[in-house]
């Protein structure tokens, strides 16, 4: 009955209006979640703690049941209120934060663990996936003889060995130090892209999500609020919450005046992702720490003053006190540093207008 399915042929994993509540919980962990992951795609799910990211992976993997909606993997209905295909029959691989390698097994035995015992080609397959993760020759080592990054690559090799239709990665880099994290995430992206495996990465780290995913799905309160290519998400964030999630920012009240938005931080060029706004409309203006320009300002008028300064090497982060006493943050190259107490003007460059959203009622 192919004609009746709504799934596009290229969608490999789809969640349609999925809700899931843990036993005894008052609020659902997933609340009408929709998501379609395309074959071969690397998709990241980004969201604050408690937004349902891990639960989304767990219902896809089959570790949790759903109370409403449908999940399809590779064209098969695997979850619905009256249907639950077991995790082992979904052919989905998982990589966790804590590697979950068996300490008493060699690398080769760890990788072979998920392969069918009867399969005589398992040695060849182990060799091939170790090659893929650049750890050929490590077959006889034990996990404790490897670095954290190497252990995570073994965990990845183990997940890829049985040729899963999709790979689910649950915060796989968060136990590693910053430097290693950025190296490993690049390697992981290259490995799964080379291998062509559809992958879903859960993370609360925006740099990670924007940096390695083809598309990012932003979750909040158990559902996806926006999904798109990283740059689209950054420039056209659907809501102020999404905007803050994809780039550090302060939100100030503003009012539309022609091509400008007037705020107590200054007058800025703006972009309104939700559509045109009339003159005089009150808005929430999202001032991104990395996207503003700052300079000394001698003229009379509203005062914005440097009252905090943090040297970070190439960049310096400034705290600017606004007329109301609030402080916002602006990051600027460290050349010609501004002294504490300097009166400044804040502007938005032509190519990075301030994002504005019709004002939400304040409680
Ligand atoms: P995230 O991964 O985005 O941090 P989770 O999917 O872990 O979010 O959690 C979503 C919601 O479900 C949270 O409110 C959390 O407290 C709740 N939750 C998660 N796991 C359980 C569990 N085993 N039992 C009850 N509630 C849970």
Image: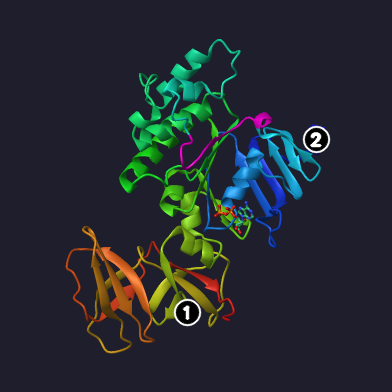
Outermost residue toward the bottom in this view:
300
Tell me the SS state at disc 1.
Answer: strand
Q: In which quarter of the image is residue 10?
A: top right
**63 in relation to 193, above or below:** below
Asked if residue 162 lies left or right of residue 329, the reply is right
Comparing 104 with 283, the one in front is 104
Residue at 33%, 34% (x, y): give it: 147
Residue at 35%, 63% (x, y): give it: 290
Tell me the SS state at disc 2.
Answer: helix
Residue at 47%, 21% (x, y): give it: 109
Are there few (<14), some (14-19), or many (20+) residues within 10 Å of tag 2? Answer: few
Residue 206 x/y as whole percent = 44, 54
Pointer 2 residue: 3
Instruction: Please report the bounds of the magenta region as a residue range.
Output: 88-100
Pointer 1 residue: 254
Question: On the rendered image, what quadrant is the C terminus found in?
Answer: bottom right
Residue 133 x/y as whole percent = 41, 27
**213 in relation to 336, above or below:** above
Residue 338 x/y as whole percent = 20, 73
CB contact under 8 Å: marks 1 and 2 = no
Whether residue 94 is in magenta: the answer is: yes
Comparing 142 with 211, the one in front is 142
Comparing 336 with 113, the one in front is 113
Asked if residue 93 lies left or right of residue 314, the reply is right
């Amino acid at each position: 009955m192919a004609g009746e399915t709504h799934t596009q042929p290229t969608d490999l994993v789809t969640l349609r209006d999925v809700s899931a509540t843990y036993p005894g919980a008052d609020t659902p962990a997933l609340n009408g979640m929709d998501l379609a992951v395309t074959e071969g795609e690397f998709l990241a799910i980004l969201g604050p703690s408690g937004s349902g990211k891990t639960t989304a992976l767990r219902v896809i993997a089959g570790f949790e049941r759903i109370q409403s909606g449908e999940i399809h993997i590779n064209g098969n209905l695997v979850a619905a209120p009256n249907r639950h295909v077991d995790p082992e029959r979904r052919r989905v691989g998982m990589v966790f934060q804590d590697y979950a390698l068996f300490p008493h097994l060699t690398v080769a035995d760890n990788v072979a663990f998920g392969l069918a015992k009867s399969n005589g080609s398992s040695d060849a397959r182990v060799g091939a996936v170790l090659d893929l993760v650049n750890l050929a020759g490590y077959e006889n080592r034990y996990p404790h003889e490897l670095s954290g990054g190497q252990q995570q690559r073994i965990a990845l090799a183990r997940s890829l060995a049985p040729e899963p239709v999709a790979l689910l990665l649950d915060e796989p880099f968060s136990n590693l130090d910053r430097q290693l994290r950025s190296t490993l995430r690049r390697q992981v992206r290259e490995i799964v892209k080379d291998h062509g495996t559809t992958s879903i990465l859960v993370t609360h780290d925006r740099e990670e999500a924007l940096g390695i995913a083809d598309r990012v799905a932003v979750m909040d309160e158990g559902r996806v609020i926006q999904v798109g290519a990283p740059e689209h998400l950054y420039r056209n964030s659907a809501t102020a919450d999404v905007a803050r999630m994809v780039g550090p920012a302060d939100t100030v009240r503003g009012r539309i005046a022609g091509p400008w938005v007037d705020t107590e931080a200054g007058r800025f060029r703006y972009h309104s992702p939700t559509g045109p706004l009339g003159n005089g409309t009150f808005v929430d203006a999202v001032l991104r720490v990395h996207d503003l320009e700052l300079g000394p300002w001698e003229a009379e008028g509203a005062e914005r003053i440097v009252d905090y300064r943090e040297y970070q090497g190439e960049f310096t982060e400034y705290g600017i006190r606004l007329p109301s006493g609030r402080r916002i943050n602006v990051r600027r190259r460290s050349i010609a540093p501004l002294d504490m107490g300097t009166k400044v003007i804040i502007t938005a460059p032509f190519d990075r207008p301030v994002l504005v959203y019709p004002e939400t009622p304040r409680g």
